[in-house]
Amino acid sequence: MSALRQRLLPYGLLGPGLIWLVLFFVVPMYFMGELSLKTGSLQTGYQLTWEWSNYTEAISDYATQFGRAFWYAGVATVLCLLIGYPLAYAIAFKGGRWKNLMLFAVIAPFFTTYLIRTIAWKTILDDGSPVVSVLKFLQIVPEDGRVLATSAAVIAGLTYNFLPFMVLPLYASLERLDQRFIEASKDLYANTRQTFLRVTLPLTAPGIIAGVLLTFIPASGDYVNSTFLGSSNQAMIGNVIQSKYLVVNDYPEAAALSFTLLAIILVALLLYIKFAGSEALMGDEEETA
Amino acid sequence: MKAWSWLKNNGVMIFAILALFYMLLPIAIIGLFSFNDPAGRYNYEWVGFTTEYWQNPFAVEDLTDSLLVSIRLAFFTSIGATFLGTLIAIALVRYQFFGRKAANLLIVIPMATPEVVIGASLLSMFLVYGVELGFTTLLIAHIMFSISFVVIVVRSRLIGFDRRLEEASADLGATPLTTFRKVTLPLIAPGVASAAMLSFALSIDDFVISNFNSGAEVTFPLYIFGANQRGIPVEVNVIATMLFAVTVIAMVAVIIQQRRAEKMAERRADEASKPAVSLPI
């Protein structure tokens, strides 16, 4: 094989897939950006008029839904971390012969359709359900209150649906943790709590970062949970984008909203990476070299 | 005092079991309500036990059609994404070349983009060009979002790969293509297979991106979304439970098969390890 051919080979391998990603991921972003600066309607057609007011209007009209999306996603992410860390810890260190079965239970929800899982929560939190009766008995929910169509229901749904995305990276980083560090810490007379806070937690930070990103980003754009478990009072920005694109057909403003969502997430991502390091995003870059 | 130390030792495990119970509860509910005999159109409250819907799970024609569309879509997505993604993974692991970082970035960013934005941007492009939405646009979108996941799965398999096996093949006079076919491909086959299964699963489960780019085509998740207003038929629960069971059985079969293969390999390695250099695979 000639040297030139050898040098061109990687591009030949990459080519088809990367072209696909450019054509159907990068280029569409350009068209969405352009659409967000147009005026017009479905009947009259759209002209590019550099209509920046699409953005200012979109943001001021739907600030509530933006705020709600990030608030719900944030709470759900924190809950996922609080539930997911002990769970991943137990699987990695206490699982023993049950380890594989426990891991299997974590990914089992993926084997049923996302929508059906969410609808199952509608059954669980339905007004007459046993769960709600217990909550009423404990006075957590007032006698005439309901759980469905509240923020709590939407956050519960988000937490449930994105929990595996938190547990799996946490488990991976706990599993890789070198046990000798923990032994060393104990040899140096650290108690359990000190060992956890000063050894285990810092060493599993990459897993936490990956888990937080994998939970927060999809949760903030989600509209399935608020559609099924909430009401219009729980509408998130995803609901607005969906209805503007697919129901109202107000494309320019919908595009402006999607672009704003993407921009906020990218900025948050960059800030987060700046503080937390970039390994989480780029994965095992070093190992591949 | 004794109880306290027991709790301290096992507290994490008890918490984990409760958390797993929480994760599995909706699946149990889906299965349970496939035997429900709802009074009205809505299947949210338990009324009575019946096996009626299990006897004829494909009675709702629209539902069955949507399931077939989803399976067909997932099949083609899996082939397309696995092919494109595997080639990218090989290039990234095997070669140093200009633009590597950019290529890596292009693969990671779609996974860090909210689905609603991916769906919306693709729809924007299709609108501008007046592309008619349907099976083709769905296939384009599904292959697009599956590629990144395929790359990651196959790449992790390639990283732990012993290059000397390929060198040996070349030394024995095999052409690069023969080496790829007879050595490389069989060794990375498990990774490629799991990538194919993953992209199949991602495709069959996708709702958000499909919601934007389906046109008049109805996939299984889209059918459920549409049926939500008028009441979701019990058959949806039956089919969901069947899909769950099939996946679990397939996974268990794969695991048993792998264990058996590993044991065989170990035994063979034991016998061969005495004189020669063993190759850790």
Image: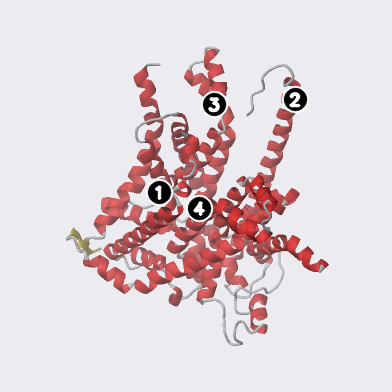
Disc 4 to disc 2: CB gap under 8 Å: no
Give the quarter of the image for residue B17. Answer: bottom right
Local packing at callout 1 (Cα closer than 10 Å; few below 14, some 14-19, many 20+) is some
> Residue B138: where, in percent of width, then height?
42, 50
Q: Which mark is residue B109?
A: 1
Q: Which mark is residue B270?
A: 2
Instruction: Kindly state the secondary structure of the residue where label 2 is placed.
Output: helix
Instruction: Identify the mark nearer the N-term, 2 or 3.
Output: 3
Q: Are marks 2 and 3 in contact (CB under 8 Å)?
A: no
Q: CA distance from mark 4 to mark 2?
A: 39 Å
The residue that disc 3 covers is: B184
Residues at marks 1 and 2, CA–CA distance in whole angstroms? 45 Å
Residue A258: x %, y % from top left = 34, 61
Q: Nearer the viewer, mark 4 or mark 3?
A: 4
What residue type is disc 3 on?
Thr
Is B35 or A91 nearer to us in this picture? A91
Image coordinates for residue A117, horizontal then vertical, percent: 58, 62
Instruction: Inspect the image, locate mark 4, and give the three-letter code of the amino acid beneath it.
Output: Ala
Would you say the residues marked 4 and 1 are in contact, meaning their CB atoms lie under 8 Å apart? no
What numbered label is drawn on residue B47? none
Instruction: Quarter of the image for the C terminus of chain B: give it.
Output: top right
Residue A5 sits in quarter: top left
Kindly state the secondary structure of the residue where label 3 is placed.
Answer: helix
* Whether residue A101 can be seen here: no
- Answer yes or no: are tags 4 and 3 on the same subunit: no
> What's the distance in space between the residues labelled 4 and 3, CA to CA?
31 Å
Residue located 59% across and 86% down the image = A142
Q: Amino acid at mark 1?
A: Ile
Q: Disc 4 designates what residue?
A: A210
